[in-house]
Image (tube, grey):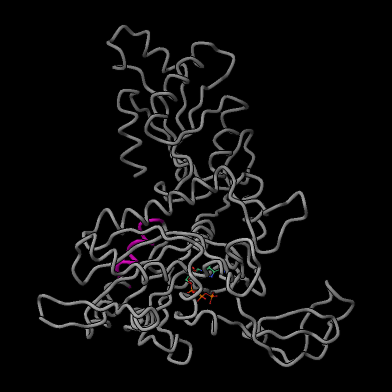
Amino acid sequence: MEKLVALCKRRGFVFPSSEIYGGLNGLWDFGPLGVELKRNIKELWWRSMTQLREDIVGLDGSILMNRAVWKASTHEEQFVDWLVDCKTCKARFRVDHLAEARCPLKPSKHPGECGGEMTEPRRFNLLFRTYVGPLEEESALTYLRPETAQAMFVQFRNVLETSRKKIPFGIAQIGKSFRNEVNPRNFLFRSREFEQMEVEYFIRPGTGLEELEKWKEARLAWYESIGLPRHRIHVRDVPEGERAFYSEKTYDLEYTFPFGRQELEGIAYRTDFDLRQHGAASGKPLDYFDEETGQKYIPHVIEPSGGVDRTFLAILCEAYDEEDVAAEGGKVEKRVVLRLSPRVAPIKAGVFPLVKNNEALVRKAREVADLLRMHLRIFYDESGAIGRRYRRMDEVGTPFGVTIDFETLEGARSGAFAGEKETVTVRERDSMRQERVRIAELLEFLRLRVS
Ligand code: ATP
């Protein structure tokens, strides 16, 4: 894990937030490559949910909402963790992370294990409080949303009427959520500000368990399509005592991170709890007349709720690899490679002139870069030995390296019509295999392999 965190910092994937001021616990900034990877994840999710399906439409709700929403959703009252403090060293713990009855802090922090006595558990609400308008008084209080879901419930009627969808149909949303986590930890896994990708899928009563199974399959297929194969994801049937009280059945999709097997996404059958609550609290019933059955009912809901940041982290953990490769002079070198799915890779191809002190090579390489740039995210690099340039791209998961070399120039001089004989070397990241591809076919060659 330390290696991955270091790589993320060194290569511009993730930086600690406010770093020059000492940072702020549980908050991260995504650097030039991180922002691309994250956008690709979100784009692929959005495409699979809205563009490729007729039954789901999108929404982009506000982060601040009327406080009444959080009362009706039970967050104001019940979105809590239980805390204990060590009476000796004052360290604070979330109860379900604490097996020991005594403070477990290790000698690195204290001389000897602390072992202090713990306080009684007390409730701690995870909502971030804020005030809307100039007065910091109770009537102006609201919260930063701790999940994106609620906007999709309270806009149910508007979306239904404007999109003219019929049940079963869903609303999809991607956006920031905020939780004042007691112990943010494990890098991006548990932070205080993160992004969620959620669908609220509205269904007929009585079809919940069947729809839940379909969603489980759909979500596993999506993770597979971005480089997290099914056999690497564990489906946990969450037992009754651990589910939200209104959920009839919930699956957690879990990934084995270096720090243990943990939740990537929850898929919950939430019955009609959400629409019933908001209908009752607002006085505007959120029911539905089903023309097919002639019945009026409050729709039930399946909610697949995934984390962008946890997916980002799982993808990087899955992709990180080190291997020994043969280097010059019969030596063996360590190669760090991110075996990212080309679909999520932040850069799709590196473009390199073989050497930088040859004007014709550089000119041709820039031409190739310009040709590709319009369609794919590429990285042009002319500095250092070609092997070093390949390694830098391996380390950030770029699936292809395109090298413009002397054979390219020979092709250009051979008298054939433009592009006919001009070829470049294309090197594939994982196998390091190289092949010659005509410039005229290069864009199509790459496009087929990265989308
Ligand atoms: P946990 O038990 O790990 O706190 P949760 O069950 O409270 O998670 P949900 O409320 O189901 O999480 O949120 C849905 C998804 O949002 C999670 O599966 C996860 O991917 C993401 N998520 C939740 N909390 C965080 C967080 N603090 N940091 C990053 N992602 C989060």
Q: Is residue 71 above or below residue 56?
A: below
Tell me where residue 392 appears, x and y as whole percent: 58, 38
**Residue 269 in sight here:** no
Residues shaded magenta: 216-226
- Compared to residue 247, the image places residue 128 above or below, namely above
- Where residue 252 sits: x, y (%)? 43, 77
> Horizontal placement of 415 versus 338: left or right?
left
Q: How many marks?
A: 0
User: Farthest residue in the right direction?
Assistant: 111
Please name whichever residue, 311 or 54, is drawn nearer the observer in this view of the structure: 54
Which of the pair 123/221 is nearer the observer? 123
In the drawing, does residue 169 fall left or right of residue 18?
Answer: left
Percent coordinates x, y for residue 249 in the rendering: 36, 85
In the rendered image, is residue 62 in sight?
Answer: yes
Relative to 328, does residue 252 appear above or below in the rendering? below
Quadrant of the rendering where the N terminus is positioned: bottom right
- Tell whether 225 sits left or right of 8: left
Please name the residue shown 67% across and 54% down the image: 17
- At a point 48% along the width and 88% down the height, the residue shown is 242
- The quadrant in which residue 133 appears is bottom right
Q: Nearer the viewer, residue 68 or 265?
A: 68
Which percent across, then down, holds residue 134? 63, 61
Q: Residue at x 57, y 24 (%)?
A: 382
Q: Residue at x 62, y 37 (%)?
A: 330
Which one is nearer the viewer's eye here, 203 or 380?
203
* Apparent side of residue 285 relative to residue 118 in the rendered image (left or right): left
- Quick check: is 348 in the magenta stretch? no
Looking at the rendered image, the quarter that the C terminus falls into is top left
* Main secondary structure of the magenta stretch: helix
